[in-house]
């Protein structure tokens, strides 16, 4: 893959400028990198672009699954300066629904 010319900006500066643009008012999802899919069984699609290359991550049944896939892939490809989605804390949800007993096994 060739070198892309971004003016005097580094890869990090160019990515952050593009990724931190305001979200369109008519966007389908509240998460970055998640959009509408034409498949009714998997209505959400995750994808992103970096250095002129498109990364298609797949189709998902829920918006949250697609956002998680986006976060994982962007972290691996872009690295430490990647902008990630803020996802709801699943650990807090599971802890509130599961009570611990004196034994090792949780009671639901």
Image: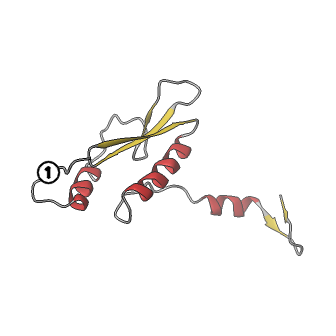
The quarter in which the C terminus is drawn is bottom right
Number of residue marks = 1
Q: Nearer the viewer, residue 72 or 90?
A: 72
Residue at the limit of the structure toward the left, as seen here:
7
The picture places residue 90, in percent across and down from the top left corner, at 62, 58
Q: Nearer the viewer, residue 72 or 65?
A: 72
The picture places residue 32, in percent across and down from the top left corner, at 39, 47
Q: Is residue 21 left or right of residue 58?
A: left
Q: Residue at x 88, y 75 (%)?
A: 102
Tell me where residue 11 sits by quadrant.
bottom left
Q: Is residue 55 left or right of residue 25?
A: right
Residue with the mark numbered 1: 5
Residue at the limit of the structure toward the bottom, as seen here:
102
The picture places residue 103, in percent across and down from the top left corner, at 89, 73
Residue at the limit of the structure toward the right, as seen here:
103
Q: Residue at x 52, y 24 (%)?
A: 39
Q: Is residue 19 above or below residue 53?
A: below
Tell me where residue 16 sits by quadrant.
bottom left
Q: Nearer the viewer, residue 16 or 92?
A: 16
Q: Secondary structure at mark 1?
A: loop
Q: Residue at x 26, y 54 (%)?
A: 15
The picture places residue 50, in percent across and down from the top left corner, at 31, 48
Q: Residue at x 52, y 41 (%)?
A: 63
The image's colouring method is secondary structure
Q: Residues within 10 Å of mark 1 (few under 14, many from 20)?
A: few
């Amino acid at each position: 893959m060739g070198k892309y010319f971004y003016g005097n900006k580094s890869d990090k500066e160019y990515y952050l400028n593009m990724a931190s643009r305001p979200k369109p008012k008519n966007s389908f999802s509240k998460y970055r990198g998640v959009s509408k899919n034409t498949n009714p069984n998997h209505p959400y699609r995750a994808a992103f672009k970096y250095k002129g290359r498109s990364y298609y991550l797949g189709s998902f049944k829920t918006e949250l699954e697609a956002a998680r896939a986006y976060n994982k892939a962007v972290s691996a490809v872009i690295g430490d300066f990647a902008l990630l989605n803020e996802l709801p804390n699943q650990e807090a949800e599971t802890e509130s629904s599961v009570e611990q007993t004196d034994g090792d096994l949780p009671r639901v």
